[in-house]
Amino acid sequence: MLRIRFLTFSLTLIFALSGVSNRLFADPENLDPTRGSIAGTVVDQKTGETIIGANVIIEGTTQGAASDLNGSYRIENLSPGFYNILVSFISYEPVIVERVQVEGGRTTRLNISLAETEMSIEGVQVTARRVTHTEMSLITSIRSANLVASGISAQQISRSQDSDAAAVVKRIPGVTLVDNRFVMIRGLSERYNASMLHETYAPSMETDVRSFSFDIIPSNLVERIMIYKSPSADLPGDFAGGVIRVYTKSIPEENGLNISYSGGYDPEASFQDFKTQENGKLHWLGFNNSHHSLPGGFPENLRAIANNQSAITQAGQSLNNNWVPVSHNSGMNHSLHISGGYTFKLGRARIGNISAISYNNSKSIDNVDRADFNSYDMEYQRKSFIYRFNDEKNGQSIRTSIMHNWSAELSKGHTIELKNQFYQLSNSEYVLRTGPHYDFNYNANNHSFHQVYRGIYSGQLTGSHEFFNGKTSMNWTAGYGYSFRDEPDYRRYRSDLDTNTRDLTLYVPFGAAASYFLGRFYSEMEEHNITAALNFTHRISLNRFPGFVPEVSAGIFYEDKDRYFNARNLGYVRANTMQFDQNLLDQSIDYLFQPENINTTTGIKIDEQTNPSDSYTAFNLLKAGYLMFTLPFSQKIKLVTGVRVEDNTQSMHSFTLTNQPIDVVYPVTSILPSANLSYNFTNRMLVRAAYGKTLNRPEFRELAPFGFYDFSFNLVKKGNEFLQTAYIHNADLRWEFYPTAGETISFGVFYKHFENPIESKFIDGGGSGGIKTFSYENAASAVSQGIETEVRKSLEGLTGLRFFDDLSILFNAALIKSNVSLGKAGEGQLVSDRPMQGQSPFIVNAGVYYRNMKSDLQVNLLYNIVGQRIFIIGYHSYPDIYEMPRNHLDLSVSKSIRNRMEIKFGIRDILNENVVLMQDANQDGVFDREADQVIQKFRPGTRFSFGVSYKL
């Protein structure tokens, strides 16, 4: 009830503020009930895309307006009567609309479409350039697509507070996020989605999951994001949820420079005492600069020099004594973006460049409650804690991004583009963990220092060409991608708190080291991608069948991917159990790591914990080709059908714990048919039906036998070299209606059948003291089915009131049901079937947008909620862990000043509800946060932002 009241209050407030601002900024003459106005949108007749800068004039006068960045115009202060309206724009045929009636106190809606033409001015050919960043152009792309698609445009992105592509995509129907960076589509986990930057696969920066980290791309570099949900022969075959294609900004519409700055205030984290670790000189840019890396000359394997005590001591003393956090005032979050575009003529070619650099630095302080449990006592309905911890987590994220794109329009129908993008992201985290550990009988005062540097470069040279008066088209791509993930010096140590005296005692293992209690971890991963693609399409004119112009498309795709992963696990133990100086345990951690206390007798010594399986080398070679036919049987019916063949070979080299080599070579050739049928009832309404077969391959990390301890969740992750490829049969049916060029209403159903789906699960009996192990397995089969709906609608003209004319709404929702038949993979689990891991039963996005053209004011309210979903699969005595739903509400306000400056203000996550992971311990089907077992709980905090941008 409180949430409903808050939402009602927020909506009332936003409408009230909008109405007040409308009055404040309106022209007083406009309020005259004897005067009227004409308003509407100017679009391209063929593509439906908005036209910027079109002149809309009352014939015979100089009174008029020019269409803005959204293609919208408004002519005000008109006496009642009839007017002839002249609309013109370069390279389009002018249009005169006669006898447009204006009534006092009312706005007459007049949307205009212009037909493109070609003309010569002193030998110079003038043609229109396609606009792709607007909401109208996005809807046009979705409408004209041959398959089921969704998307979001730069125009809609600018109305939100989303700072990166990960936050942006969750606004798209059927899309959710995992860990705030991995994309799930239609409730299917990130492994079932293919991510592409323009025309090539996006390199991975993750060692543990098959996914692209969308949080690395700043939202202000995105032109549009398209998600294709039904298979097609010209799309990659390795997906089930969707193919996500991110397009960054290309050639600018005009020359100029844009500078923007924004600041953020977090009541929990801004201007607070912020704890972090010592960092290098380039850390503020998100780079390591070798500050946290192992020193040069450090032994490659300490076991090889175990008998050389002097060398062991020297190795231990060579590492930094950086076990104490440093504190400073956190200040505020801030970001800076500079972008510029320039176009010029070189002979007959039009050359364009757009370059941008973005920087973002944000801090957070979270208090996270964590717990884990022994088997639930069903008889007495009691839970038994293993531990109950509280984490004080100080986190910092730094992102630096550079984009440098070139385009050359050599002549009509021939374009070559060079796209360069580099993204660098640094995530650092200091955690102080306190609370009782009941199984180990101590009160924890544990510390961790974690730093991850991720980077990606994507370079693509592309070309598109038309021949034979446009009957034949060809496009090609040559790409190189590089990504890395550097995790240097992940340090953890344990100390025990005496709850009576409040004294701390350091814990130093004896015998064998336990690096998660006192140790350091290093890992490095590099991935290189080389990609090439070539596509042809030819339209066939059949004189015997007028109006029937089929298309034949064919293409080839090649990708060579190499990955190198190496890990180093180092722990510390008592140098000599009998001679160890017990007084060291009562000292501070930095005193323990003084050089004189790292020795072979009374102090501590470094110990190699690295296993042969902790490193691997992997390769993937994908060769694909397709043949596709587009058959427009009439103006109403069109069939697109084809087949794709993918020949893929995965190979991985690693070692067992006993240093025996493991070589996995997994060649698979797959034939993937698809068909998409559309029927147009009218030029604004159609129905699509689609079927296609796709697949899902195991990833490198999932095949690697290497195990890694995750401090955050107190568990060990391990691969499985016996995984098999999963196959998916996909079916879609969707109805689409487009009331105007910028509006859409759709409703669809989908069905997916999986063979051998790959999932992660806990391994029964793995670990102790709450430290569990999970790995990957193939289930027998699975089914996922659901319905989706989307509405993008303006309220203009519905009431006759000016305020509602400025309102538009966005709503999309998905209801999804899935079921996994576990087969042998279900041995030891509580049930033989259950929902798929990560699948949400419902997803809802909603938005209310207010835009006053006269005052250039926008106010937007955005809402999101995702249903409960399985986070990690359990086993017979340990129930599945679920992520619980939470309501997310954002408010943003922006004001443009003379089309050059824009001021923004926003509130993110107004409701600030808890993020909760929990188990239905008593298996009654009800998630009770008191009676059941809460694994993790924290509030991410409400954030306030303000910003300003200026165009030069």
Image: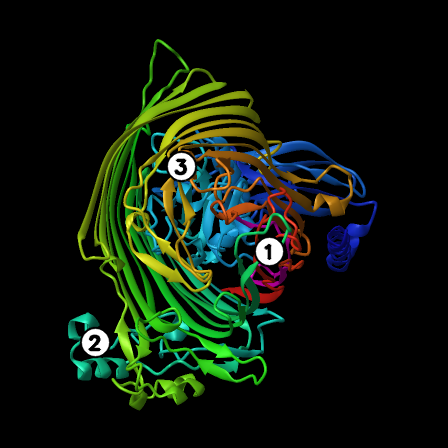
Amino acid on which the number 3 mark rests in the picture? Ala
Residue situated in front as seen by the camera: 791 or 304: 304
Residue 684 placement, left or right of 604: right
**Of the image marks 3 and 2, the number of the one nearer the N terminus:** 2
Crowding around mark 1 (Cα neighbors within 10 Å: few <14, some 14 to 19, many 20+) is: some
Q: Establish if 641 lies above or below 143.
A: above
**Of the image marks 3 and 1, the number of the one nearer the N terminus:** 1
Residue situated in front as seen by the camera: 650 or 826: 826
Helix, strand or loop status at disc 3: loop
The figure's colour scheme reads: rainbow
Residue 66 placement, left or right of 108: left
Query: Which of the numbered marks, if any, corresponds to residue 383?
Result: 1
Residue 5, given in percent of the width and then of the height, sits at 77, 53
Query: Which of the numbered marks, if any, corresponds to residue 947?
Result: none
Amino acid on which the number 1 mark rests in the picture? Lys
Residue 216, given in percent of the width and then of the height, sits at 42, 58
Q: Which residue is mark 3?
A: 779
Spatial CA span between label 3 and label 2: 44 Å
Q: Which residue is mark 2?
A: 298
> What span is colored magenta in the figure?
881-908
Q: Which residue occupies 46% across, 82% down? A: 505
Helix, strand or loop status at disc 2: loop
Residue 573 lies in the magenta stretch: no
Spatial CA span between label 3 and label 1: 30 Å
